[in-house]
Amino acid sequence: MHLFDPITLRSVTLRNRVVVSPMCEYSSTDGFANAWHFVHLGSRAVGGAGLVLTEAAAVSAEGRISPQDLGIYLDEHVPALRAVIDFIHQNGAVAGIQLAHAGFKASTAAPWNGGGPLEVDGGGWRPVYGPTGRPFKEGWIIPEALTPEQIAQKTNDFAAAAKRALDAGFRVIELHAAHGYLLHEFLSPASNQRSDEYGGSFENRTRFLREVISAVRSVWPDELPLFVRISASDWIEHGWQIEDSVRLAVILKRLGVDVVDASSGGISPDAKIAVAPGYQVPFASRIKKESDIATCAVGMITQAQQAQSIIERGDADLVMLARELLRQPYWPLLAAAELGRDVAWPPQYERAKPS
Ligand SMILES: Cc1cc2nc3c(=O)[nH]c(=O)nc-3n(C[C@H](O)[C@H](O)[C@H](O)COP(=O)(O)O)c2cc1C
């Protein structure tokens, strides 16, 4: 298998296995996509990626990480997204959206404004929600524990957002169940100390995510793929472990999930993460092999040969790049040339193609 071999997921064929990893741009007003998103996502489609995923798009206003997050919680958000999607599709890539709720990490400032919790008089909001009343860390906003009725409402929010994503023209949805945001907060024993049917056992902690997947699958057509990003390990002793991820992935496949995107961390400030090139690839590899589901590898993948080896060895079906694609939107076109694959360049840029 080659990085530049196409891959078909349900009815959707990606021209190659390079995916633009979701990246918050903190550039929206009231959740709307604008010229920044058009250029940012559009240029990565021009750059040759197979799948272009948006940043985490909030399924409700209070589920935004920051006031500047992209959102898909209003029907009015759809037209601006449609323009971006059409451009991505006209340029040979497939457009996907990451759906998210920030949970106890909601109402924070953009990173370049410090990234910490944002007070109401500084543009933040209350309440923010979590599985319990425990904050992400000391000094952060104390969340309100979601009631079962509110959990059902959040589940509906994900489904309504998925319906809007379909109307907008997205062909892939990724649910964000990683990085310490709401769905992950329920999965992890480090953040979920509930004693009702949404806490305690593995079955109870995975219930919310399972309900969200079922609700999303009921409005997202059978012919379109569904991805779930998880934190495959919390990197703490009493947290979520890779063995939990393998077990979860088997269930996700049964629920109609096509790809597990294996990221890690984010639930605890005490996590000791051994960051190095390709450090999360073993998670994608183990989930793929032990759960028999397609996976996506992400995290410090920057070199063409490195990405090719991941695909060739069968460690993952897709590779996602984030920061390297910020440095170099045309990374896929250049990587193909480096790997000796003749891929089509946009005709406008044809004269720059390495011979
Ligand atoms: C600017 C920026 C914004 C990010 N926003 C998101 C996001 O919205 N959703 C998400 O799941 N991960 C997000 N991430 C994490 C990336 O998708 C990716 O998993 C991480 O950066 C590791 O990949 P890399 O080493 O290729 O950068 C973000 C990363 C960066 C650098």
Image (tube, rainbow, N blue to C red):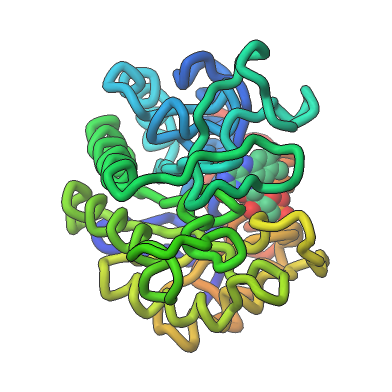
Is residue 29 among what the camera can see?
A: yes
Q: Nearer the viewer, residue 32 or 16?
A: 32
Left or right: where 189 falls relative to 251? right
Q: Quadrant of residue 98?
A: top left
Residue drawn 23% across the image and 32% down it: 167
Residue drawn 35% across the image and 58% down it: 208
x and y percentages locating residue 148 in the rendered image: 30, 50
Q: Residue furthest front?
A: 195
Q: Quadrant of residue 6?
A: bottom left
| Looking at the image, residue 20 lies above or below residue 270 | above
x and y percentages locating residue 110 in the rendered image: 70, 27
x and y percentages locating residue 169 in the rendered image: 28, 35
Q: How many marks?
A: 0
Q: Residue furthest top?
A: 121
Residue drawn 75% across the image and 59% down it: 300
| Looking at the image, residue 101 lies above or below residue 271 | above
Residue drawn 23% across the image and 58% down it: 214
x and y percentages locating residue 102 in the rendered image: 53, 41
| Looking at the image, residue 258 lies above or below residue 220 | below
Left or right: where 338 falls relative to 215? right
Is residue 47 among what the camera can see?
A: no
Q: Residue furthest bottom?
A: 290
| Looking at the image, residue 233 lies above or below residue 350 | below
Q: Nearer the viewer, residue 62 or 48?
A: 62
